[in-house]
Amino acid sequence: MAIDLRGGTCWHTSPTGIVKRHAPWSTFKIPHFLIALESQAVSSPGEVHRWDTTKRPAAPHWPDAWAQDQSLESAFTHSAAWPFQEMVSKIGQSNYTKWLGQFKYGNGHVPLGRDDF
């Protein structure tokens, strides 16, 4: 569900979608940003991650802002998924488990070997 704080308009997927559990998708970028910094997987929000077009080719649905090198800050701003996916192995499962537990985030389950959120 999303609410436009200026106009008060409320959007949701469907009446049943509000109560159904979903994968975190882009909302996970918020704790992921903090976990990346706290676990020192990145040195700063400005650290640049080079886009490897072979490993992460642009998908047809990608906005232009995704198909380029990204810092943690620009990836967060543009909601670009691939830089966050690249950080998964640097952060490691134990760091995710630790921080998600401290945040009390969702069910705290961290799927081994996955970076697709």
Image (cartoon, rainbow, N blue to C red):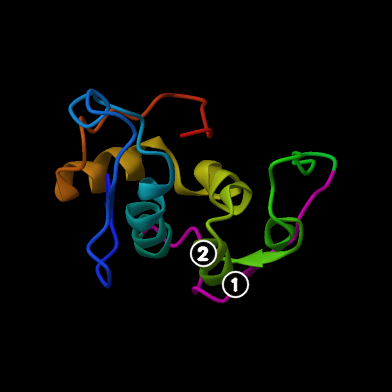
Identify the residue position indicated by label 2 in the image.
Answer: 42
The image quarter containing residue 38 is: bottom left
- Mark toward the start of the polypeptide (1 vs 2): 2
Q: Position of residue 112 (x, y in %)?
A: 44, 24
In the image, residue 90 sits, relative to residue 12, either above or below, namely: below
Tag 1–tag 2 contact (CB < 8 Å): yes
The image quarter containing residue 3 is: bottom left
Identify the residue position indicated by label 1 in the image.
Answer: 47
Quadrant for the C terminus in the image: top left
In the image, residue 111 sits, relative to residue 31, either above or below, namely: above
Describe residue 63's horizontal placement relative to residue 5 as left or right: right
Q: Which mark is residue 116?
A: none
What residue appears at the point 44 percent right and 62 percent down from the top-left corner? 40
Mark 1 falls on what kind of element? loop
Mark 2 falls on what kind of element? loop
Looking at the rendered structure, the number of numbered marks drawn on it comes to 2
Q: Which residues are magenta?
A: 39-53
Q: Position of residue 27 (x, y in %)?
A: 36, 48
What residue appears at the point 43 percent right and 58 percent down from the top-left corner? 36
Q: CA distance from mark 1 to mark 2?
A: 7 Å
Residue 49 drawn in magenta? yes
What residue appears at the point 74 percent right and 41 percent down from the top-left corner? 56
Describe residue 1's horizontal placement relative to residue 26 as left or right: left
What is the magenta segment's predominant secondary structure? loop
